[in-house]
Amino acid sequence: MTDSKYFTTTKKGEIFELKAELNSDKKEKKKEAVKKVIASMTVGKDVSALFPDVVNCMQTDNLELKKLVYLYLMNYAKSQPDMAIMAVNTFVKDCEDPNPLIRALAVRTMGCIRVDKITEYLCEPLRKCLKDEDPYVRKTAAVCVAKLHDINAQLVEDQGFLDTLKDLISDSNPMVVANAVAALSEIAESHPNSNLLDLNPQSINKLLTALNECTEWGQIFILDCLANYAPRDDRESQSICERVTPRLSHANSAVVLSAVKVLMKFMEMLPKDLDYYGTLLKKLAPPLVTLLSAEPELQYVALRNINLIVQKRPEILKHEMKVFFVKYNDPIYVKLEKLDIMIRLASQANIAQVLAELKEYATEVDVDFVRKAVRAIGRCAIKVEQSAERCVSTLLDLIQTKVNYVVQEAIVVIKDIFRKYPNKYESVIATLCENLDSLDEPEARAAMIWIVGEYAERIDNADELLESFLEGFHDESTQVQLQLLTAIVKLFLKKPTETQELVQQVLSLATQDSDNPDLRDRGYIYWRLLSTDPVAAKEVVLAEKPLISEETDLIEPTLLEELICHIGTLASVYHKPPSAFVEGSRGVMHKRLPARTGSGESTESPDVGTIAGGSGTETAPSIIPSQGDLLGDLLNLDLAPPTTTGPPPPTSGMQMGGMDLLGGGLDSLMGDESEPLGGDIGGSAAMGAGFGAVPAVMPASLNAPMGGGLGDLFDLGGGVGMPLGAYIPPKTVWLPAMKAKGLEISGTFARRAGVIQMELTLTNKAMSVMTDFAIQFNRNSFGLAPAGPLQVLSPLSPNQTIEVSLPLSTVGPVMKMEPLNNLQVAVKNNIDVFYFSCQYPISMLFVEDGKMERQVFLATWKDIPNENESQFQIKDCHLNSDAASNKLQASNIFTIAKRTVEGQDMLYMSIKLSNGIWVLAELRVQTGNPNYTISVKCRAPEVSQCVFQCCEAVLKN
Amino acid sequence: MIHSLFLVNPSGDIFLEKHWKSVVSRSVCDYFLEAREKALDPEDVPPVISTPHHYLISIYRDKLFFLSVIQTEVPPLFVIEFLHRVAEMIQDYFGECSETVIKDNVVMVYELLEEMLDNGFPLATESNVLKEMIRPPTILRSVVNTLTGSSNVGDKLPTGQLSTIPWRRAGVKYTNNEAYFDVVEEIDAILDRTGTTVFAEIQGVVEACVKLSGMPDLTLSFMNPRLLDDVSFHPCVRYKRWESERVLSFIPPDGNFTLMTYHVNAQNLVAIPVYVKHSINFFESGSGGRLDLTVGPKQTMGKTVEGVLVTVHMPKTVLSVSLNATQGSYTYDNATKVLVWDIGKLNPQKLPNLRGSLSLQTGAPKPEENPSLNIDLKIQQLAISGLKVNRLDMFGEKYKPFKGVKYITKAGKFQVRM
């Protein structure tokens, strides 16, 4: 008597047989047949051919049969919209049924039939059900509004369902309130700016009352909604906290975490000296610990969130280190997260315990976990100074195990320890040198070479060691090559007499035999330095290095604040703002923590002020374009007399001194910024920051394909057959290295042969190699999307710069942005994901077939209402009308006709955007007057401003 | 909200799909299956996976993957909690949660899933409510249904759905009114090589089986409620009373439910009931090694330790073992490298011992990693934290119920490092 019988088939053909059974007179047989159909459906078989037969069974008194038919309908209505209409009458009738269960079922099912035609019939029954006397029906109807909104948002707004839904927040039944909140939240997600959930003290009070009485799921919706409220002052904040706190003891972990979110957020407003503040802090720890005894999947999400909480408020869990100790049978994803939190909680008080644990983990089976454990020991050493010695000795113990990957990880972290505590632990170098041969990973090799170079004077056979690496120079990765070059130069400066030969060898390897421009450039710089002024070289290469920072991989404070507001969501699991990756959230809605109000108390502690100040200043990820333009202009000027494109081939031996290899700017640059260039590239994040201080000048002056003279050379090489002289704005820095862990991105947009290209310059200013680049765009006004993957084939070594051209398509998802030509971009590499936004010149979207027929032009011009016309002035343009016309044509702005009236040239132009929008323009040029007037007419007037800016940019360049 | 659910068996076949919004192609599961391939163990599959258009949140329960598809920002814990609820519901309805059982009852499972969510919003997840809407199968009922043509689907609105106590249905009637409470404590601990406690905590749970007529209002009090500073309650428990009086006051759901879970983690309160003397040595030559294990009782409060089971995860290169157990029996699975020693009851007079030799793969070096040892055990009639129920009072009904409390202590994740 099991359902598996529904899966047995006969030879005759299943569908045929089912059809016969569905049309049988016997009720029982019918029901069995529908069950068979449903069973097939659940395993993914296509039984849509039976649609009419199943729908015929719908008119029945048997509730089970009815429900079964509904299940079928929901699945297949979309594929058979015309047939689905057949069901409408039954639904409408059922919505009047005296049994509330049937009414609710009907309205619920109808909402699930995603067919436009049905939605029209749904409105009336839905309106009735929203006001139904039975709360069960009302609560079902509330959800139905969300469903309908998903299918046809306009209809929901027009019918006023949103207002009805808002009214339901004040419903007497808590379950109805909860569902109304849930539905509104879902709708609000697709309308980020709409003020759907208008929260005020009265509605908050209602929500808090419902919170105590509704189901666990309803509590989650209500808590998530509460978290969006901004209390007026600390008193209100406290009273909300007090009413939310009991939720921390709920059995449902999602309720607990949502409550934690509300508390973490509202706590921000409480004065720190308040007793309640301390009580609240104490109350937060136990529920978080309890989450860690739940199922591993729950633990994982909890741990990701705890990671954020620990960064924001380390005091909450500082005594709970032990619960993060890794258990043997934890899944690997839990182990890695626990490890991360252990390091964040490590302090002088508990470091002994932590180290003992980490050492234990370093002997486990899982390689990834072991590696991370070894790294963690290094991080502890850097974080807790008192423990450094113990950490080093632990690492030495681990090196003694001779397990290959353990040794390599240990050497990488010891290098960082050396940087943090110079001249302290160098006694261990001998032990490290013993393991030279077993190192096969680039990072470990580079670290070892750095150590040898840095302490060359203390290692007797440093030259031999480095020489041994030099033998296989060409097979090494760029990271190792660069490091080897630097290390040998350091060695030479320390022991010049014995190592002259070695340094010459490495310099010639780097400059003559290598294809890598970074390596070559660095080689030349050293070469010149050594040959012109060895004293300066010493100052540069052996300069004092900046200390590396204590805490690595902390989340940036503004992002952390935003993520705290998103505790419990996917954003908190991925540690990324939701705007960056969730498809459903259309548009950016940055949440921030509320500032403390202090409510007139003068005893505000000083750091309160900084918090408030910090959240007050907007640190938008976008780069101000004007600043970038300025930089571009400056560079254009500099580059006016095109210098040599690359370093000239080295002439004989060391006689390069007199030649001005890199233009006059270099010397002063080196003088000013000797530190970052100097020697140490294997350092730290601080290093990247050091470079970041010289914004873009270095890479740009070395190889910058700018709009100017040099740029054109590159451009010609890049795009064959492009329209001559199409305007390409100069590259601007979109993502400074400071914000992206050492990755700097500058770029521009170009249109070549009808293809929109995003041209990027990626510069690695961090200490480690970057790989696995990928790029993604947020929805944008014109549907720009990458047409292919980001082609960064070889890993990007430290200090390397590459040029990438990314073809774009205009068929991506569309969403109107503000400003219109704003583009939000996410770039990923092996280190992290970074976000920035940039603005593209709208001229990139002007298509080649944008030339309108004269007649059509006239008609269209008249057709577009006058209020859509806007006028702009272009000042200081010294072109005659023909030159202007040619220049514009190159950017696909086509002149259709020209008229001369009283010494004034009128150019009529048409432009077609990639999404088919036509823009018409009239340009008036008066001979002798450098000011032009341009009138732009378009059915979509919001593009006018952008078009004008483009014309201006094109004409002026 | 939750968009779709797929049930996937260990070999990667999707054997059930349910969509609460539009239909999502099952090809979306490929991303999951890929991650499944990569993981060494099914338990290691990451619970949250992102794909270009969806997020996949999954749990692994009873050797099955419950995989949900979501499209918008949804709290992942909400999804995971819900998935666990689905697994529990299947267990509750059909006695076990397995592929066979689900396939045998596929239509009913499908109907239940439809009742549990509407448009991805939870609708009815309380077992009491669900059982009123769709009655669980019994042999008798299916026979009756076949004869009379009546169905399993209730046509009345479940009473609990909208009351402020959604977990209890109205009109419950029993001839024998009884209420049982099981206090179950699990010890999670890590002991280091020397037997020192690195970490120990107790996960406690009070499971209830309440079969009382009408609308009973119960009050449960403890002798030593101070132990409980970290608790989570079933929604029925009145939090205010707990805050002020430290008693559990509640109108119980009908049948089995988890009344409360708690957590004792003050180290000195956690007694460690057994100790293990162990030595494992591998010869420098790398050809083999020796193992010697002894288990003995430690802090047992005078109770007998039963069901002792020692599991050792051996290094990968251990090919076979040749051991001698003074009590119980042992097995060694060469595929998973797991040695299991089933001891049974612990006799303090004659401590069980397992010793003998291990042989390694020929030519394999001396293993680098340390094996780790897990212990299972059970102690009847003892809550190791010392928690004791004081009394249970009932208000609101006239009859006299039969009451019972049982204690049991088990090992949770109890690990000894070797």
Image (cartoon, coloured by chain):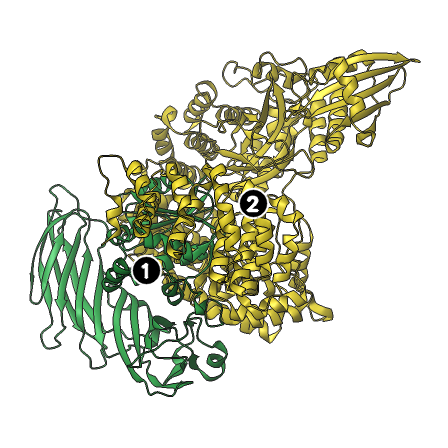
Chain colours: A yellow, B green
Quadrant that contains the C terminus of chain B: bottom left
Corner quadrant of residue B82: bottom left
| Extreme residue toward the right, this view | A902
Q: Which residue is mark 1?
A: B150
Q: Please, what secondary structure does the residue beneath circle 1 have?
A: loop
For residue A155, above or below residue A179: above
| Percent of width and height locating residue A458 | 40, 42
Callout 1, which amino acid? Answer: Ser
Please indicate, yes or no, whether residue A522 appears anywhere in the rendered image: yes
Question: Viewer-proximal residue, A62 or A909?
Answer: A62
Q: Which residue is mark 2?
A: A119
- Name the subunit of mark 1: B
Q: Nearer the viewer, residue A392 or A16?
A: A16
SS at mark 2 in the image: helix
Q: Nearer the viewer, mark 2 or mark 1?
A: 1
**Image coordinates for residue B212, horizontal then vertical, percent:** 34, 79
Number of labels in the image equals 2
> Label 2: how many residues lie within 10 Å, few (<14), some (14-19) or many (20+)?
many
Examine the rendered structure and indicate whether residue A815 appears above or below residue A156: above
Q: Measuring from the top left, give residue A223's x and y in whole percent.
A: 55, 62
